[in-house]
Amino acid sequence: MTDRYSAVKLRKGAIGGIVVLALLVASGPERFAQVVGFISSLITWPFTRELITEANRYEIRNAEILFVYIVAVLGLNLFFQVGYKSIGQSAPMLVGAYTFGIATTTHELPFLAGLLLAVVGAGLLSLLLGLPALRLGVFTLAMVTIGYSFVAEDLVFEWRGITGGGNGLSGISRPSTFDTVEDYYWVLAIAAVLALVFTRNWLRSELGRAGKAVADNQVAARSLGVNLQSVKLRAFAVAGAMGGLAGALYAPLYGFIAPEGFTVDLSILFVLMVLLGGSGTVWGPLLGAVVLFRIPLAVEEITDQPGEWSLAVYGLVLVLSVSLLPNGLMSFIRGLRRGGESQSAGMGDASVAGLIDGADASVGLKVEGCSFGIGGLQILKGVDLDAAPGKVTAIIGPNGSGKTTLLNVSSGFLSQDDGVLSLGGADISRASAEGRARSGLARTFQTPLLFEQMTCLDNVLVGLDQADRRLPFGAIFRTPGWRRRERAKIERATAILVALGLGPRLDTAAGSLTPGERRLLEIGRVVAMEPSLILMDEPAAGLTDGEISVLENLIEELRAHGVGVILVEHHVDMVMRLADHVIALDFGEVIASGDAESVRNHPDVVRAYFGDDPEGELATPVEPSTVGGTEDV
Amino acid sequence: MSEIKLAVRDVRAGYGGADVLHGVSLEVRAGTIHTLIGLNGAGKTTLLRCISGVEKLRAGSVELDGRDVTSASPSARVRAGLGHVPENRRVFPKSTVTENIRLGAVGSRVDRKDYGPRYDEIISHFPVLYERRNQLAGSLSGGEQQMLAIAMAMITDPAVLMLDEPSLGLAPIIVDRVFAEIERLREAGTTILLVEQFARRALSIADDATVLQLGHVVASGPAAEISSSGALDAAYLGG
Amino acid sequence: MSLWPAVMSGLAVGAVYALIALGYNVVFSATGILNFAHGEFFMVGTMIGAYLFVDVGLNPILAVILVALLAGLLGVVEERVAVRPAMGDGRGAKSLGWVLPTLGASILIRSVIALIFGPELKRFPPILPDKVWKIGEAYLTSTQLSLIVLAVAAGFGLHLLYDKTDLGRALSAVSQDADAARLRGLPIAALTAIAFALGSGLAAVAGFFAAPFVTASPFTGLVFGLKGFVAAAIGGIPDLRGALLGGLALGVVESVGADIFGGGYRDSVVFAALIVVLLVKPNGLLGRGEVRAV
């Protein structure tokens, strides 16, 4: 359990860090500007030969700009965490700044009202823009976000009546109680701290887990019932809202805003800050912001073409980032602390008795007349399947017979050409994969699809999160109810993993597990969802004898508690032992159906499998050819 | 003692934190079929990938025809006479059968001007492929793709041919045909390293065998000995 | 008010977008990567082409060849320094590790060009004689016509490459399964370098011929790179005909849109077009396949 221990140490270190940071911020604008100026000028000292040790008004303003950047970057980080890249955070910032500016000057609204309008406006706009844009791929989205930056600037010029066009908007004042530059510091400091707390709560909760899951493996996430579009959209909208907040806070700093302050290059700087610090981490963007903040200022001092030189530096950093610090500073720092990976400790005390809580009601899956073809090949031809509630149904057949395709169609990852599917009587023929998962239909994949970068515990927690979906307020505000639920989830997840023999691997990244452990983890995650029916695609493939017996015990436990299992398997003995009902497929058609014994001895089945050699064995665990396999998903 | 065409010495390799192969050694005699058997996760595919040079070694060496190729690129090894029929066939689905076979020759020791004649020679051994020569490889059945993958390796005129689980996903009747083809290749003088999970079948045509379990060699020697020894039962090999 | 002038100039600009889009497709076909720096190679073509043609007084044919070679070389260097490290350890194009390094390369190239040449673009006189062609009610200058011809020729040339040559087929194989291609001895390193050289060379040539009517700004490369990408995506990456169709269509739509709604909405029209097309046809107008390319 060495990883657990060092996690405790890390937590203590983090709390220490927060205290120091809080003290620093609370020490006031002069001291803060001094310290930050000093630290960040250290980075550029080789080029400027100057260490910032004084805190004049210029430095205080710089420190305040840093706070603004921090808010924007923390927001952007939430979106990066989902696996997508936005190179357009300057756009909501521009929207926020101008909304605030126009609201407080032309319409003379008070400071807080202006802030609120800016935040809501930028957030809503991001939501609207994200609706179509987030259906695109990562790269296309990145390009579109750059486009937003350009379009935002264009529109500022176009609507010069209200925005002042190229001349900018001036006369934006600070709130009356914080009128001076030094006093305004407190507003910004509080905003930055709140932003940090907000993003920390977000990332260390079911919201963060969902984001990581979507970034790691979209198919696996969908199979657990995660709605990809929702996860991406809320991250994008919140990132936009925080960008808007940053813009609104920025506007009163100099009292003047113009389009030049919100170019693509600013967006690029933000991306760099998130990336360098470590995207998806809590502290990373903060670190990245402090480290990179001083560069443009230093470059300004030493060259006559500050813009281009700064840019060159950013470019170089980005180009080298992959080779030097692929995962950012935070993971580099964490890497220094980490010990060796724990070796596999065997099955231990694996016992699945009492693990299953039981489904609310047993449901069956009915497939009628299902047909599916692709590229001229007909893979399923009018297949019927009736999996009775709470029973184990096995699907057997030689390769190419369409077993995996049948599972893919049943779980919603492929759309049938013809046929009706119903779960517990309700028609799911047109339902999405994630929708079916939420209705209680779970599945595992031929090759276990895990969230490789997440620990075993987190993998299972994602499953548990889906069983109990609710609004995120608890997570953000850390209510006692939320804390209780989170503890309960961790307990349950631990129990599941221990029951499956994965106790020693709780804090190990899924990517480091053996093939058998991977399979068991995937099944554990599915069990956490509390499904009514589980589709298992060759679950025994690659498992050792010990692992297979855990699997069989689990399937029996599931059945005993009313959770149905549909099993595609090659291990004949396993099928004979477990199945209540068996269907045999060959070339996309059902050739036999009934209890295990009679199907096994059915002449058509024997012929399909063994050809002319009745003594021959079934081929051992297989991968499908490119058509009809999980690659199509 | 016949010549060693392919040798692997004390190879260590892995992904991320863990090692998958822990000091594996193996020798393949010229003109023989050497089968490498073991369960999933034993490291068989990783070993083949190390021999081909697409996976980096953490320790150990690879010798082809007595020459050390450990630091040679995958291209160079193919040019030196190494052929690899990958697990799951891995043909190029959007190219035609003919294009696939020609592509096998690109980058190999076959001269540009010989692509045509070599293609004609190879395809004559695979009448089913000839029938489908203008079809997209992605539309072929598993068995046909397996034959195509073998043809793609054969066009390079390999001295050593490695096949990674050619029986995977194929009905027993098709497996018969594939194995018959492998035996024919041995008759023609090719040295063969055959990786299989399907131990019994593989041992029935092999001259030598090595048993791999969780990255360690647990037994090695003439196929007949391995068949009858307890080493197979010790690790549940099925087949 | 006739829209014809807008359509004609739209076709010319569209031809430029098409050329840029073709370059994206070549690189993507072979590597699964979309090069962020692609637009900057267009800029290199404009700037260095202007320098060679105007300042040095080089023969335009020589100038364009030099520019293409230089850009090709730069492309190979970019691949080696920025892209390859991101693709190492078998992570491949799907891991998207290349997005940020290519962004970095684009910024680096942009800043170096600005540092060398300064922010002002040289005056670039037309290369071809000042002839005007009448098509229906509209007029096309020889520069505009030459661009359209160039785009179509490039598209056709690439088609021949992929269909009839072993090089082209090898490039296609790498895009289908780079790992299997490596295993079988295809010289991946060389093929990737060739793809990058070809792609960036194409962009630079487009920049050279487009120089007379490109307005200078630090962001020109980015803007053209973006719009070229939009054209490729609309047409369907990595389809060659898609690049041509997408480019020409986008040019016309942008031009007509600017005419109708006003110049300030030019970029908005472009991105609106992208979103609309991709929502209706996620793989682009001519794209195929179940899984979206990008």
Image: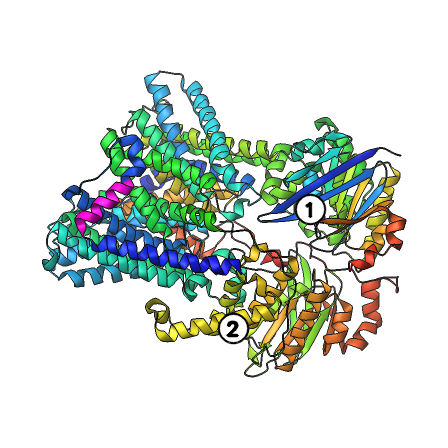
Residue C292: in magenta span: no
Residue bearing mark 1: B22
Residue A38: in magenta span: yes
Question: Considering depth in this image, is C144 or C162 the residue closer to the camera?
Answer: C162
Question: Considering depth in this image, is A565 or B126 the residue closer to the camera?
Answer: A565
Residue A143 shows in this picture: no
* Callout in the foreground (2, 1): 1
Question: Considering depth in this image, is A600 or A134 the residue closer to the camera?
Answer: A600
Left or right? Give the position of A348 relative to C43.
right
Question: Considering depth in this image, is B151 or A281 the residue closer to the camera?
Answer: A281
Residue bearing mark 2: A492
Helix, strand or loop: magenta stretch: helix
In the rendered view of the protein, which quadrant contains the C terminus of chain B?
A: bottom right
Left or right? Give the position of C288 relative to A210.
right
In the rendered image, residue A1, in percent from the top left (x then y), is placed at: 53, 61
Label 1: chain letter: B
Q: CA distance from mark 2 to mark 1?
A: 37 Å
Q: Secondary structure at mark 2?
A: helix
Identify the residue at image location x=76%, y=45%: B163
Identify the residue at image location x=84%, y=54%: B201
In the rendered image, residue A242, in percent from the top left (x then y), is placed at: 29, 57
In the rendered image, residue A96, in percent from the top left (x then y), is placed at: 23, 55
In the rendered image, residue A343, in percent from the top left (x then y), is placed at: 61, 56
Label 2: chain letter: A
Please say if the residues under marks 2 and 1 sit with CB atoms less than 8 Å apart.
Answer: no
Residue range in magenta is A28-40
Image: C175 above or below C197: below
Amino acid of disc 2: Arg
Image: A422 above or below C142: below
Amino acid of disc 1: His
Residue A401 image-quadrant placement:
bottom right
